[in-house]
Amino acid sequence: MPQSPLTIDTAETPWVDVYRRLVEIVVPRPIALASTVDAEGRTNLAPFSFFNAVSANPPLIAFSPALAGRTGAKKDTLRNIEQVGQFVVATVTEAIADRANACAAALAPGESEFAHSGLTPLPAERVAASLVAESPVNMECELVEIHRYGSEGGAGNLIVGRILLLHVDQALLDGEGKVRSEHLRAVGRMGGNDWVRTRDTFPMPRP
Ligand SMILES: Cc1cc2nc3c(=O)[nH]c(=O)nc-3n(C[C@H](O)[C@H](O)[C@H](O)COP(=O)(O)O)c2cc1C
């Protein structure tokens, strides 16, 4: 006899349990390493896996810092983008996965994850936030809008940004100017504490 599926009525389930199942199921998730500054220009860096590209024309990306689970407080990234309206998203590669993870530590506002993680800030051209020197891809973005989904812990705040400048390390490119995934070596996020590499690709022509 086939087992009936586990069915979760989200309205009857604590949000943390829904969150745990959700991040196990919506996989693999790309990771935005979001670089921001506060109104005083102090740098901040944090990873976000509720992240994707959402429009090509105009070129938009979106990621979602949740309100803190226990306190409902805004994360520094959200507060900084509200204040400054700009950010940089860097790609997380195998080479910097551990340092990107270190940026998820709860530091005091104004204490920089760059110094804490060992990643290096570089001045951007169009925005106040810094590029991440060790990442081969950095996107300079201006805020388009923030969609807020509640005021309690776990509520997402979808930040949509327009890419102004897209910096790609030339070492990633093949002879046709395409980014080779085996050179990029991006990593993604799975459920729990699991991460994933992007080496196991397979071609399939579009119908
Ligand atoms: C790989 C990874 C992905 C994460 N994705 C998210 C996410 O999508 N949304 C979120 O609110 N927190 C996410 N976090 C947790 C934040 O990075 C963490 O709360 C961080 O301290 C926020 O930093 P900030 O207060 O400087 O903005 C993630 C952590 C890791 C390690």
Image (spheres, rainbow, N blue to C red):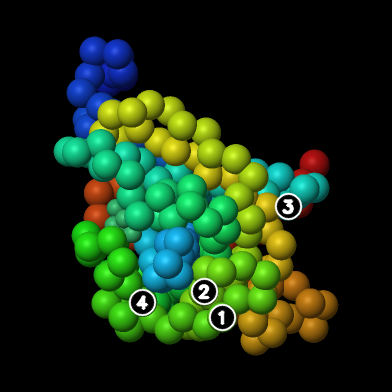
Q: Which residue is mark 3?
A: 59
Q: Amino acid at mark 4?
A: Phe
Task: Please provide percent x and percent y for residue 96.
Answer: 39, 77
At a point 40% along the width and 50% down the height, the residue shown is: 79
- In the displayed structure, does residue 6 sit left or right of residue 36? left
Q: Quadrant of ligand 1?
A: bottom left
Looking at the rendered structure, the secondary structure element under dot 2 is: strand
Sequence-wise first label, 1 or 3: 3
Q: CA distance from mark 1 to mark 4?
A: 13 Å
- In the displayed structure, does residue 138 sit left or right of residue 8? right
Sequence-wise first label, 3 or 2: 3
Q: Residues within 10 Å of mark 2 (few under 14, many from 20)?
A: many
Q: Is residue 69 above or below residue 113?
A: above
Q: Residues within 10 Å of mark 1 (few under 14, many from 20)?
A: few
The count of marks equals: 4
Q: Residues within 10 Å of mark 4 (few under 14, many from 20)?
A: many
**Tags 3 and 4 touching, CB below 8 Å:** no
Q: Which residue is mark 4?
A: 114
Q: Amino acid at mark 1?
A: Pro
Q: Which residue is mark 1?
A: 123
Q: Amino acid at mark 2?
A: Ser
Q: CA distance from mark 1 to mark 3?
A: 22 Å
Looking at the rendered structure, the secondary structure element under dot 1 is: strand
Task: Please provide percent x and percent y for residue 103.
Answer: 31, 67
Looking at the rendered structure, the secondary structure element under dot 4 is: helix
Sequence-wise first label, 2 or 4: 4
**Tags 2 and 4 touching, CB below 8 Å:** yes
**Tags 2 and 1 touching, CB below 8 Å:** yes
